[in-house]
Image: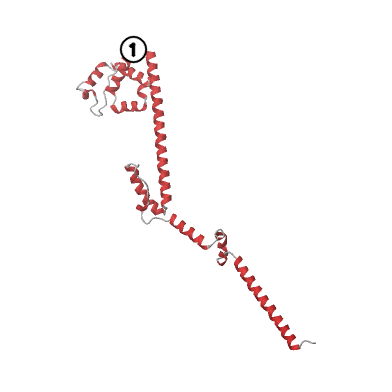
Amino acid sequence: MTEPVASGAAKEGGGDGGDQTTTQAQGDSTQQSAAAEKPWYSAYPEDLHDSLKGYDKPETLAKEHLTLKQKYAVPEKPEEYEFDAKDLDEIQKKSLEEFRKEAKDYGLTKEQFKRLVARGLEQNKQFWERRKAEESEAKTKKDAESRQGIEELQKEWGNKFKENVDKAKKTMQNIFPASFGKFLDDSGLGNAPEMVRAMVRLSESISEDVLVKSQSKNKASNRDPMTGEPMLNFTSMK
């Protein structure tokens, strides 16, 4: 028996409708899949994509932003820059206060402030340690040269060593100002053989009465009234 035309048409029509529904469902599924594959930052300008692709989601970026903002925040007042000053002397504490003001002007963070202050203190410590070592080395050298000079004069003068040294000291004390003697002591030249010999020769070139008068109460009479300098009477002038 032949199937009714109407029934066949209905079947054919029903077949077309099923295919359209299936195609639309597949299209929607494809669009949803494509949307799911796009990264979360795709809606942002393309020039930001390279910077944002390292974050798996917006929340991760937001948390890092807040952390960095807090870490690199600049204090409102210079007093908010913290540093343990218990081991600092008064001069260093005063410098610290000035540096707090400069740190605020330059917009430094608290962490940057601490690191710079600590570095400055360490450099200052190293400077004074080097200077102390250099002074110690210089003193050791000076003492060695002084001993060497004394040994040289002892060998040269023998039994007259003490006598000549006394002459040199007497000439130094009575002819030259105290500031010159201090200079010789500080520089180490006071024990230099050449200087001691010069003082001995000078004492032998000056008449004894000059040295005697220079030690008396009338010391001023032995000086030039205009300049105040000693009026020396050399034996060669007689």
Q: From the top left corner, tell me how far across and down residue 109 is, in percent.
A: 42, 53
Asked which quadrant contains residue 34, the reply is bottom right
The amino acid pointed to by label 1 is Lys
Residue 174 relative to residue 192: left or right: left
Residue under label 1, please give it. 160
The residue positioned 23% from the left and 23% from the top of the image is 222
Q: Which residue appears farthest toward the left when viewing the image?
A: 217
Looking at the image, is 90 positioned above or below residue 51? above
The residue positioned 38% from the left and 27% from the top of the image is 139
Q: From the top left corner, tell me how far across and down residue 128 is, in percent.
A: 39, 36
Q: From the top left corner, tell me how far across and down residue 120 is, in percent.
A: 41, 43
Residue 23 relative to residue 70: left or right: right
Looking at the image, is 95 positioned above or below residue 148? below
Position of the N terminus, as image quadrant, is bottom right
Residue 119 relative to residue 222: left or right: right
Position of the C terminus, as image quadrant, is top left
